[in-house]
Amino acid sequence: MENPFEKIDERLARIENLLENIYSIIGSEKASIVPSKIMDIGQLSNYLGLSKSHIYKLTSTHTIPHSKRGKKLYFEKEAINGWILENKVWNQDDIEKEVVDYFIKKGKHFKGE
């Protein structure tokens, strides 16, 4: 009969090896596992799928929210997400809900079909 502690030791050794492999693959990128709240232009380019030159154009026209420190541009992830969702295209359900909410706030009765 096999010793249960040997089986546990084997499994722990396998888990340990897997973790070591994962850390060796990640290497120096361990810090980038934690999502940053601030992005530089390269990170933003990857995040949005836009070219850096297009992002520079958006910053020069003050279209995209950004900060500048010296010659470096920085972008706050939450502000970028808000900027992306600013121009939401409304569907029929959104419009109907907005109309009903408007009439409820104004205290008028609204009979839907």
Image (cartoon, rainbow, N blue to C red):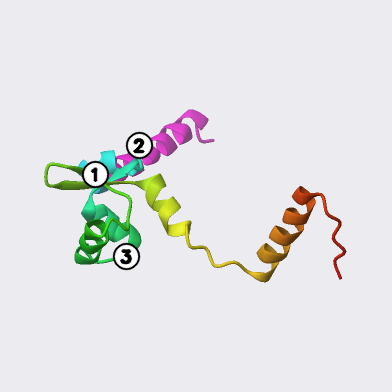
* Type of the residue with mark 2: Glu
For the record, the magenta segment spans 1-24
**Camera-side residue: 46 or 63?**
63
Q: Position of residue 88 (x, y in %)?
A: 52, 63
* Disc nearer the start of the sequence (2/3): 2
Q: Judging from the image, what secondary structure is the residue with disc 2 in?
A: helix
Residue 37 is left or right of residue 5, and the answer is: left
Question: Which mark, residue 16?
Answer: 2
Picture residue at 33% right of the left edge, 50% below the top: 65
Quarter of the figure with the N terminus: top right
What is the C-alpha distance between the residues marked 1 and 2?
Answer: 20 Å
Q: Is residue 84 magenta?
A: no
Q: Point out the frontmost of discs 3 and 1.
A: 3
Q: Position of residue 46 (x, y in %)?
A: 29, 60
For mark 3, does the 10 Å Cα neighbourhood hold few (<14), some (14 to 19), or many (20 or more) residues?
Answer: few
Q: Main secondary structure of the magenta part?
A: helix
Q: Point out the frontmost of discs 1 and 2.
A: 1
Residue 94 is left or right of residue 23, and the answer is: right
Q: Label 1 belongs to which residue?
A: 29
Picture residue at 39% right of the left edge, 47% below the top: 79
Picture residue at 28% right of the left edge, 48% below the top: 66
Q: Is residue 20 magenta?
A: yes
Q: Is residue 29 above or below residue 4?
A: below
* Disc nearer the start of the sequence (3/1): 1
* Visible residue check, residue 24: no
* Type of the residue with mark 3: Gly
Question: Which mark, residue 49?
Answer: 3
The quadrant holding residue 89 is bottom right
What is the C-alpha distance between the residues marked 2 and 3?
Answer: 37 Å
Q: Is residue 18 above or below residue 59?
A: above
